[in-house]
Image (cartoon, grey):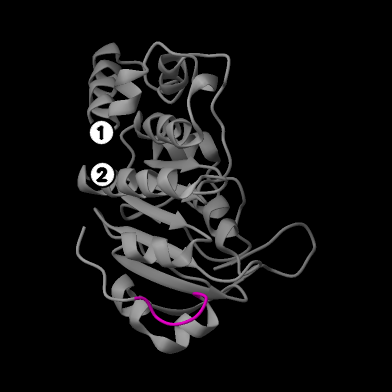
Amino acid sequence: MQAGYGRAAPVLRGFSVSVPAGAIVCLVGPNGAGKSTVLKVAGGLLKPRDGRVIVAGKDVTGAGPQQMLGHGVSLVLQGHSVFREMTVEENVLLGAYTLRDARKIAERVAFVKEIFPVVADRWGSLAGLLSGGQQKQVEFARSLMVDPKVVLLDEPSMGLDPKATSTVFEQVVRMRDAGTAVLLVEQNARRALETADLGCVLDLGRVHISGPARQLLADPQLGELYLGGRPAEPVPDI
């Protein structure tokens, strides 16, 4: 795939990635490698110049964001996107704006409350009163209201303290375990690979190397070039 902005040189140059059902795939790499551009293409915010976007065997290349929701792709952008003056309930229900079946909406509400206990506990609270990590969980819950096949997460730990970051990654695993595939972009490369099933290292718009996340963590060359030093110690299964 090739993709870029305006008349500038392409950001993605021959990029390809596959996200298996029920798996977390993380994209890591230096700034400017094209990680967020991948999510914009996959989420319908940017049309590729060449190549295809396939969801569950269907070619959805060129579909816009609302159409991508209908195809089962939900995008959570970096930073905080909750409406602070609205309640948690109102924020979450915004994720169901494409649904017309009240029973289906009620089922999805029950589902996200089970996955994210803080959403259930703070259902009637103003979203602006929640911590940054709690707000991110509200965003996750909103993204799951359409029962997506895959959720695209762009830098979910941005601006969070270590404790909140750990909680957010735990919730990413819970999404996966509940049956939703996740394509994750994250600057905290080690923590992302510790969480993911599969990893792809991007450099200059291409996949430099890919494979099981724990194998990438243990690769000394990758650790030196992309992960900030020595390879991490083996991590237990989550």
Q: Secondary structure at mark 1?
A: helix
Relative side of 144 to 76, left or right: left
Amino acid at the residue labelled 2: Arg
Residue 214 seen in this snapshot: yes
Horizontal and vertical percent for residue 104? 26, 20
**In-front residue for pair 53/4:** 4
Location of the N terminus (image quadrant): bottom right
Horizontal and vertical percent for residue 93? 41, 19
Q: Secondary structure at mark 2?
A: helix
Residue at the limit of the structure toward the bottom, as seen here: 221
Confirm whether the magenta stretch covers residue 230: yes
Residue 14 seen in this snapshot: no
Point out the tag, 2 or 1, that comes first from the N-terminus: 1
**In-front residue for pair 161/133:** 161
Confirm whether the magenta stretch covers residue 137: no
- Residue that mark 2 sits on: 174
Residue 137, placed above or below residue 21: above
Horizontal and vertical percent for residue 20? 28, 60
- Residue that mark 1 sits on: 115
Residue at the limit of the structure toward the right, as seen here: 7
Residue 216 figure quarter:
bottom left
Q: Main secondary structure of the magenta part?
A: loop
Write down the region rendered in magenta. Answer: 227-232
Location of the C terminus (image quadrant): bottom left
Q: Are marks 2 and 1 in contact (CB under 8 Å)?
A: yes
Residue 40, placed above or below residue 192: above
Amino acid at the residue labelled 1: Ile
Identify which residue is drawn at 22% across, 45% down: 179
Identify which residue is drawn at 46% across, 83% down: 222
C-alpha span from label 2 to label 1: 7 Å
